[in-house]
Amino acid sequence: MITTVTSLGRSGLSDWLIQRTSAFVMTAYLFFIVGYLIANPDLNYAQWAELNASLPMRMFSLLTMLSIAAHAWIGMWCVLTDYITERLIGPKATAIRIFFQLGMIAVTMLYVIWAIDILWGI
Amino acid sequence: MLNVSIYRYNPDVDAEPYMQDYKVDTQGKDVMVLDVLEKLKTEDPTLSFRRSCREGVCGSDGVNISGKNGLACITPLSSAVKGNKLVIRPLPGLPVIRDLVIDMTQFYAQYEKIQPYMINNTPAPAIERLQSPEERAKLDGLYECILCACCSTACPSFWWNPEKFIGPSGLLQAYRFLADSRDTATEERLANLDDPFSVFRCHGIMNCVQVCPKGLNPTKAIGHIRNMLIRSAT
């Protein structure tokens, strides 16, 4: 068995489990944010800033950001390996695919770093 | 008169494939799609397709009938004709050899990969390896596959990665041996499936279930394989 080197978990099962778990975290975050907004109709900036500056909320937000990054990595990797292949676009496919895969990974990591900067800069 | 449109391609003569129109008098009878093909073949002997048992057992005549994969021999016109028109194409995703005949090498290569035979290196008993009725029941819905390729060629994941993704048919068979109480190679079989392609290219869209002429459920079998992998890897 050849181990894939640009997939997130290096194994199908690992990727699958991460995909499901990250989806659960994102759903929980979505429900929390929507629920919070509904529960606080007259929300002001001070209250919103206080919520997001608290450590539990920062951890929850970062966990969600990491989930988005992992979810996107796995999903994009699937899309790229489906469509940018020699079968579909010819002999240059491998070089193009690696370029997009590494680019996608770099962008994903930059987003995570940026998110940390934002969350801890509040 | 029924309008029939058939995919034609003879690589020795044609530069590219084309659709040829025929008119067939079915005398108002609800015959099978294969009967229409047979009738056309008597009029135009150059029309090529595979067929053998003509009763849904051999799996030779899998074709794309009005957009849906199926066996021509057990698909009645009443379920295939839309607006007095019948469109027949080869199964999608595999190379066409001629007309409705496809090259199934890739499909069989995936089948071969899952080692579709019993592996048991323990000494053979005097008469036979016994199974309880419950153990035997686990093979129902799995052993009936006739390898017609209707499911795998309906699967986009198989279209894009036919050399890496085993496909619904092969995976149904893989589970048939994983589920067999007499087989002792479960760990090796699972180890060969834990890469991001073999099993996990299945995104559960269930095209395979929709087209299977034998009413089998490869998506469910793939779910069982996933559960077995989780059980042994966590």
Image (tube, coloured by chain):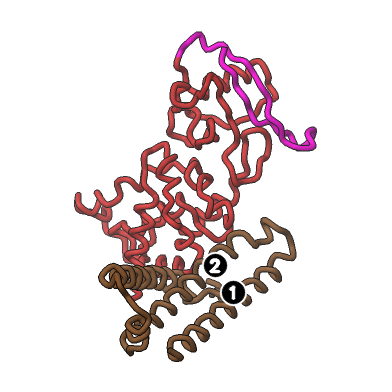
Q: Nearer the viewer, residue B37 or A22?
A: A22
Q: Secondary structure at mark 2?
A: helix
Which stretch is magenta? B1-29
Which label belongs to residue A76? 2
Residue B3 on the magenta span: yes
Which chain: brown? A
Chain bearing tag 2 is: A
Q: Position of residue B117 (x, y in %)?
A: 42, 55
Residue B85, can we see it? Answer: yes
Where, by quadrant of the figure, is residue B120 drawn? bottom left
The residue at the point 38 percent across, 57 percent down is: B222
Chain identifier, red in the render = B
Which residue is the extreme one toward the top? B27
- Dot 1: within a 10 Å radius of its alpha carbon, few (fewer than 14), some, or many (20 or more) residues? some
Pointer 2 local density, CA inside 10 Å: few below 14, some 14–19, many at least 20: some
Task: Residue at 53%, 51% (x, y): give it.
Answer: B156
* Apparent side of residue A29 relative to residue B45 in the rendered image (left or right): left
In the image, B103: left or right of A40?
Answer: right
